[in-house]
Image (cartoon, rainbow, N blue to C red):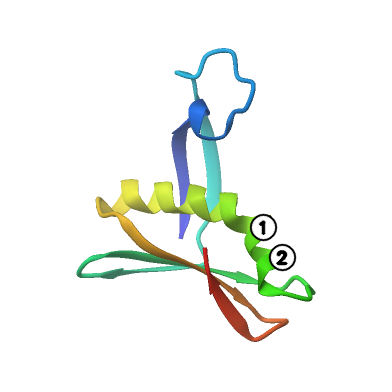
Amino acid sequence: MRFLTELPVSMYGEGAKDLKDKFIVQGAVDLCFLEPDGVVVVDFKTDRVDSMSELKKRYAAQLGIYSVACEKIFGKSVKERIIYSFCLSDEIAV
């Protein structure tokens, strides 16, 4: 699901002069689906890594952005964010 959304600089803009400023983010969520109590966001990764925690460190911020976009699009909170690794055939909640 492709998206284009506006985010506050205060969310990710360390050292920003005016934290009221906004920036535009464009991206594509690999998979998201609605459940009665919220949205689930899944991101598939092909990185060759030794552990799932490595992927979590690399991509937690990205899934945070995806979550904000999904909440705006669907008007529901994101209840779960998951990274699935094809390399390790495993998943981890972020």
- Would you identify the image quadrant in which residue 33 lies? bottom left
Q: Camera-side residue: 88 or 42?
A: 88
Q: Nearer the viewer, residue 86 or 91?
A: 91
- Residue farthest to the bottom? 89
User: Do the residues under discs 2 and 1 have CB atoms within 8 angstroms?
Assistant: yes
The 10 Å Cα crowd at callout 2, few under 14, some 14 to 19, many 20 or more, is: few
Q: Position of residue 58 (x, y in %)?
A: 69, 57
Residue 78 picture quarter: bottom left
Q: Residue at x 48, y 53 (%)?
A: 66
Residue located farthest toward the top when viewing the structure as drawn: 17
Q: Is residue 62 left or right of residue 71?
A: right
Above/below status of 28 relative to 32: above
Residue denoted by label 2: 54
Which secondary structure lies at badge 2? helix
**Identity of the residue drawn at 58% across and 49% down:** 61
Residue sitting at the far left: 36
State the residue position of label 1: 57
SS for callout 1: helix
Name the residue: 64% across, 86% down: 89
Q: Quadrant of residue 38?
A: bottom left
Residue 90 — which label? none
The residue drawn where x is 73% and y is 81% is 87
Q: Left or right: where does residue 40 sit relative to residue 25?
A: left
Instruction: Locate residue 3, reporting x and y percent.
Output: 46, 49
Amino acid on which the number 1 mark rests in the picture = Lys
Q: Residues within 10 Å of mark 1 (few under 14, many from 20)?
A: few
Q: Position of residue 7 (x, y in %)?
A: 46, 34
Position of residue 48 measured from the top left corner of the image (x, y, whole percent)? 79, 74
The three-letter code of the residue at mark 2 reads Glu
Could you tell me how many numbered marks the image carries? Answer: 2
Q: CA distance from mark 2 to mark 1?
A: 5 Å
